[in-house]
Image (tube, grey):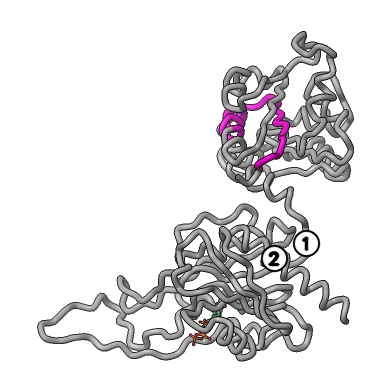
Amino acid sequence: MELKGKKIVLGLSGGVACYKAAELCRALTRVGAEVHVVMTEAAGHFITAVTMQALSGNTVFNDQWDSRVANNMAHIDLTRGADAILIAPCSADFMRKLAHGVCDDLLSTLCLARPRQLPLLIAPAMNVEMWQNPATARNARQLRADGICIFGPAAGEQACGETGLGRMLEPEDLLEELVASFQPKVLAGKRVLITAGPTFEAIDPVRGITNLSSGKMGYAIARAAREAGADVQLVSGPTALPTPHGVRRTNVQSAQQMHDAVMAAVGGQHIFIGVAAVADWRVVNASEQKMKKHDGETPSLQFEQNADILASVAATTSLSGWPYCVGFAAESENLVEYGAVKREKKGIPLLVGNIGHHTFGQDENTIVLFDDHGHTVLPKADKLTLARQLVSEIAKRLEQRSLLK
Ligand code: CTP
């Protein structure tokens, strides 16, 4: 229930992406938001108020002179007590209105009359040429300067048959953006590199050795860091997880590939978080062709040790102090003792201990943070909650560090 207790005014202006607004409305209510829909006249050409009313469970407003509003103050009342206004889709014309303070219908008037601290977020949706037109670019710049947050647009195939920037973000991406907008920006301006998931060490072209890491914790941390305002790059072993919105992702298979991808990306990073369950060994006598079975013969594999990615990154920090390195450890026993020792051994300021390997693939986790001052337990919670707590703990430590310098 990510948006439980949040009151969201969802504004629809005219555009074919109104069909996605129905899905967005549904997604918002599913995560607990109270949604109040306001539509422009043009939006009514693309979707009916009845649909939006059924999905939001609240009266839909589209007329400044609606006789159902006794005091005729819908443009004031709707936004008082709201937590955000999200205009999705936001047409080129509606961007113009917002940029110029036009208030000639209910939606534009309530935007102009919103309390100053109420966030206004827009999801542009239009043809690629309309988006790239200097007039729209000028309006977008003005909106940003006015503190209005612009989500997207995305690039791709458009309803008009052309291709390019201008598609409205998908409902699930808009939901992620909206949820993120409520998170404190404790890592604003920071670059964060994260490894996640398992690695896969080939035995032959169709077989290999891997582990049960699902990648969920690493992906949750990537999302939480991005929500906190960071620029996030994820180096991921094979997983079936979707990339968190706004995160760049490099896919790798083996520990060696993960090592190379990390070392190529580590320059200029402020924070490195090694969450991946990296194979300690690789097969040296891997076969180039698929191994065939021969009666009575059992193959034997020879291993050599993989480079320790976290330790390699930690070794690069000595001069600049960056990146701040965070490691993970899963221990099946004596977590407190082993965690502290592992942190020293890896030469890192912060190590996150998981209690037991049974955390792999689960949605919930309990973690323990080890640093110079000892250890702190973060009690059992879902992985995104823990990821946000961890991001906040990292930010706290970075701040303390810069205060000490
Ligand atoms: N790690 C890494 N590269 C490796 C192995 C581990 O970057 N080749 C990182 C993991 O991403 C994680 C931490 O190191 O952040 C976990 O180390 P772990 O495998 O638990 O510890 P080891 O040092 O391998 O010790 P042991 O297996 O003996 O517990």
Kind of residue at badge 1: Val
Most distant residue in the top direction: 67
Q: Residue at x 50, y 65 (%)?
A: 215
Label 2's element? helix
- Crowd around label 2: few <14 · some 14–19 · many ≥20 (10 Å): many
- In the displayed structure, 288 sits above or below 247; it is below
Q: Which residues, given as a range, are shown in magenta?
A: 4-25
Comparing 163 with 79, the one in front is 79
Comparing 33 with 49, the one in front is 33
Disc 2 versus disc 1: distance between alpha carbons? Answer: 8 Å
Task: Specify the quadrant of the image occupied by residue 348.
Answer: bottom right
Residue 93 spot, x, y in % from top left: 77, 27
Task: Specify the quadrant of the image occupied by residue 137.
Answer: top right
Residue 183 spot, x, y in % from top left: 73, 53
What residue is shown with label 1?
186
Label pair 2/1, CB-CB below 8 angstroms: yes
Q: What's the mark number on residue 391?
A: 2
Residue 125 spot, x, y in % from top left: 67, 35
Q: Is residue 32 magenta?
A: no
Kind of residue at badge 2: Val
Q: Quadrant of the C terminus?
A: bottom right
Residue 328 spot, x, y in % from top left: 57, 76
Residue 50 seen anywhere in this rendered image of the structure: yes
